[in-house]
Every structure is written in structure tokens, then in C-alpha cells.
Image (tube, rainbow, N blue to C red):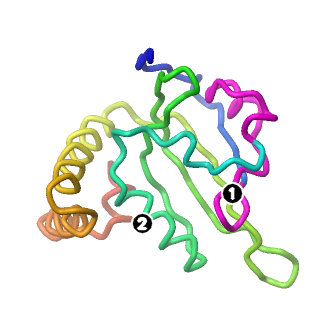
């Protein structure tokens, strides 16, 4: 595997949609380009096909908790490409509703993250991964809660102030 970092242009957006089970139902051209997959390879596939092993499970647990509670979430995510390269994104995930207000899937818009925020995120994610290796997601959650408490911020406030 290559494991090289790739970047995408400023002011461009990666967009994807999934069904309620997290299976990809749509990806824009930049989504396909960055992932390295053909459209036919991705449609119907679990979105976690792009999950990089450096990502703490806790981040995805939080993401699911938010969207399944009909709330939006912002997060920094390291994605893996088909070739094994990776790219960082700042993602905004929201539930998608039908005309009757029923959640029918999820919509994600990703942009290039602020470089200065990534140094903080990389250190945090490394700590969260270590906690997960030693004590599971619960240990990772406890560590994140402690760090947020020390900062006097909620998760959302922390992410927005990076």
C-alpha cells in the first residue's frame, strides 16, 4: 500500500449520500476521484470502505449517534483511498429527510480541513486510538470527555474552534 497523503483543491467539495445503513447511494465526481474507486465499485458499498485504520472508532460512534438522533455533526476524518493513500477532510454529515420529515439517509459534504486544526486533531486521534487499543471505545470516550471537560467545551464547540 502506498500510504501517501493526497490533497484536494481549496473551495471544492466532496459530496456523498448513503442510505440508513451507511451504504453509498451517491458520490460526486470529486468523491470518486479522491477515493480512487469507480462509481460502480462504490454504489451500494458501506461508506466505511474509506475508513482509514488511523481513525478512532469513537469518531464514527459519535457520528452515528448524532445523525441517528436527527442532528448534524462536523468532524475531521482521515479517509483511505483504493490505492492505500489517504486524505484528510472536514466533514459535515446531516440526516436526509423525505417530504414527511422521515429520515431516509445521510448526506455528507467534505472540504479541505484547516492545516492548523490538523495538528491538534492528529494528536487527539493518536491518543484516542491508544486508549481504544488498551480499553476499547469506552476508554476512548472517557479520554475525550476528560479532554473536553478540561477545555470547558462540548464536542461541537471544540470542533468549531479549531
Q: Position of residue 117 (x, y in %)?
A: 32, 40
In the picture, the quarter occupied by the N terminus is top left
> Badge 1: few (under 14), some or many (20 or more) residues near its Cα, within 10 Å?
many
User: Bounds of the magenta span?
Assistant: 18-42
Number of callouts: 2
Going by the image, does 102 lie left or right of 31?
Answer: right
Q: Position of residue 21 (x, y in %)?
A: 66, 65
Instruction: Give residue 75's position: percent from left, percent from top.
Output: 44, 53
Q: Image point 69% across, 24% down: which residue?
A: 33
Residue contact between numbered discs 1 and 2, judged by CB atoms under 8 Å: no
Which type of secondary structure does the marked residue at label 1 adopt? strand
Q: Helix, strand or loop at disc 2?
A: helix
Q: CA distance from mark 1 to mark 2?
A: 16 Å
Rendered view: 152 above or below 88: below
Q: Which residue is mark 2?
A: 62
- Residue matched to label 1: 107
Please tell me whether residue 78 belongs to the stretch shown in magenta: no
Amino acid at each position: 500500500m502506498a500510504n501517501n497523503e493526497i490533497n484536494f483543491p481549496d473551495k471544492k467539495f466532496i459530496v456523498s449520500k448513503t442510505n440508513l445503513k451507511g451504504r453509498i447511494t451517491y458520490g460526486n465526481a470529486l468523491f470518486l476521484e479522491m477515493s480512487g474507486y469507480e462509481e460502480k465499485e462504490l454504489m451500494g458499498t458501506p461508506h466505511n470502505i474509506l475508513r482509514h485504520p488511523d481513525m478512532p472508532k469513537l469518531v464514527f460512534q459519535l457520528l452515528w449517534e448524532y445523525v441517528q438522533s436527527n442532528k448534524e455533526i462536523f468532524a475531521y476524518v482521515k479517509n483511505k483511498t483504493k490505492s492505500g493513500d489517504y486524505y484528510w477532510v472536514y466533514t459535515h454529515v446531516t440526516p436526509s429527510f423525505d417530504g414527511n420529515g422521515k429520515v431516509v439517509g445521510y448526506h455528507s459534504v467534505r472540504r479541505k480541513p484547516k492545516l492548523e486544526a490538523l495538528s491538534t486533531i492528529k494528536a487527539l486521534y493518536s491518543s484516542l486510538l491508544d486508549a481504544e487499543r488498551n480499553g476499547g471505545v469506552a476508554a476512548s470516550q472517557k479520554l475525550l470527555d476528560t479532554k473536553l471537560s478540561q477545555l470547558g467545551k462540548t464536542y461541537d464547540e471544540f470542533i468549531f474552534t479549531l
